[in-house]
Image (tube, coloured by chain):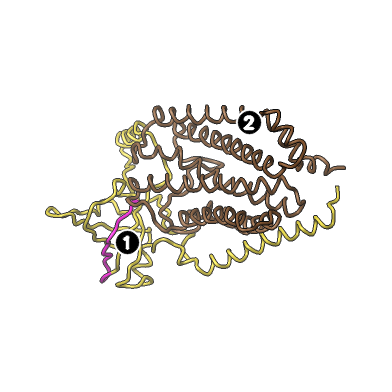
Amino acid sequence: MAWQWFHRLGSPKWFYEKTTAWMPWLLSISLLIIISVSIWALGFAPMDAKQGNSYRIMYLHVPTSIVAMAAYYVMAIAGGIGIIWKMKLSNMVMKVAAPIGAVLTALALFTGAVWGKPTWGTYWVWDARITSVLILLFLYLGVIALQEAFSDQEMADKASAILSLVGTVNIPIIYKSVDWWFTLHQPASIKMTSSSIASEMLYPLLAMIIGFYLFFTWALLSATRSEILQREIKTKWVKQALLQKA
Amino acid sequence: MAMHPVRKQRLMIVLFIVVFASVAVGLMAFALRQNINLFYPPSKLINGEAPEGVNIRAGGCVVPGSISRSKTDLAVSFAITDGKGDVTVKYTGILPDLFSEGEAAVVNGQMQGGIFMAEQVLAKHDENYTPVEVAEAMADASAKTGTSHQASCDGMDMSGNKNY
């Protein structure tokens, strides 16, 4: 049966056992990249001709923003799979993606405000880019709230999945807002074809983005594993796994 | 390989939610397209499309050579352009670090008799990042060859496809 691999992926036990070995690797490699690239970006990448040193906050602002948007797709696709295949694991991924995404979005907004003050002359402006990212934060907070609002987990998962799916429309809006409307935020610097960043500034940025993706993967898997243990606490294998740890 | 009919139906529901939400938000954005813009381009201010005596924002490229500062206080005046027209801006206060000729700026204030009286000036920087040495080398090279690469508003996409 062609769908067998897919259904096995949905087994919390199989997922928990498979990912155990990955966890320390994901965490150490991502931290290694983030720490070493921070030194590279803050200490060795050249100063920008116009912005001086303040441009360096982009090494935090850009990765958090990109991964915050990617995390939303992870949450919404997991919610969609949860609705279609009634897969327990998928609903767990959706639930745990929300707080991680919310933290990343808050960080993106905060670093953007800190960057905006010296360059634009203001912490905040209600332009299309910044406002749509604020809506992204509210969508994440909405999913977190919906998870808490229902005593029945199945209802909570269904409601969160619908909100996540409706909110997907916001992601292309965030991405294209700087091209569609007049905004204070500058257009994208990294493009598929050409980039408007000097390569000695671009490489640490790309490395930082990879580091943040890996760290996000670790955080997502780690939170999913905790969620599996909580929801499957009554099963035999979880009891055994916990006994083995103790 | 065929999907279970119940799952197929639920897949349709999921797709319907996404498509329906996108169309709804798309129509809303289309209806509000003017209000979503952060600022008016100068050509619209000249045409009188922007209201007078009401707080609005205008944005454009600071015309090189148009900045004139008062010798006694923080008053400054400059012109902003979108390539189709320019408007004079008057402002009293400290300008942001990145404010300069040939760079874009967004100003907050009121149109009064064809002059924009700004209460706030924000610098809109571009998406280019260049090391100091490279920028200096480029300036040197253009000075040697005699070609002028001084700040200009040529490459500024302040109008174009965003003009509704």
- Residue A46, how many percent across, how many down? 38, 31
Q: Check disc 2 and report its element: helix, strand or loop.
A: helix
Q: Quadrant of residue A142?
A: bottom right
- Residue A162, how many percent across, how many down? 66, 58
Residue A23's disc number = 2
Whether residue A130 is visible here, answered yes or no, is: yes
Q: In which quadrant of the rendered image does the C terminus of chain A lie?
A: top right
Relative height, residue B148 to residue A125 (above, below) = above
Q: Quadrant of residue A38?
A: top left
The residue lying at 74 percent from left, 40 percent from top is A12
Chain letter, colour brown: A
Relative height, residue B56 to residue A180 (above, below) = below
Q: Is residue B122 magenta?
A: yes
Q: Check disc 1 and report its element: helix, strand or loop.
A: strand
Q: Residue furthest right?
A: A1
What residue does disc 1 label?
B108
Shade of chain B as shown in the rendered figure: yellow
Circle 1 packing at 10 Å, graded few (<14), some (14-19), many (20+), is some
Left or right, B145 with respect to B33, comes to left
Q: Is residue A102 magenta?
A: no
Circle 2 packing at 10 Å, graded few (<14), some (14-19), many (20+), is some
Relative height, residue A57 to residue A113 (above, below) = above
The chain letter for the residue carrying disc 2 is A
Relative height, residue B53 to residue A206 (above, below) = below
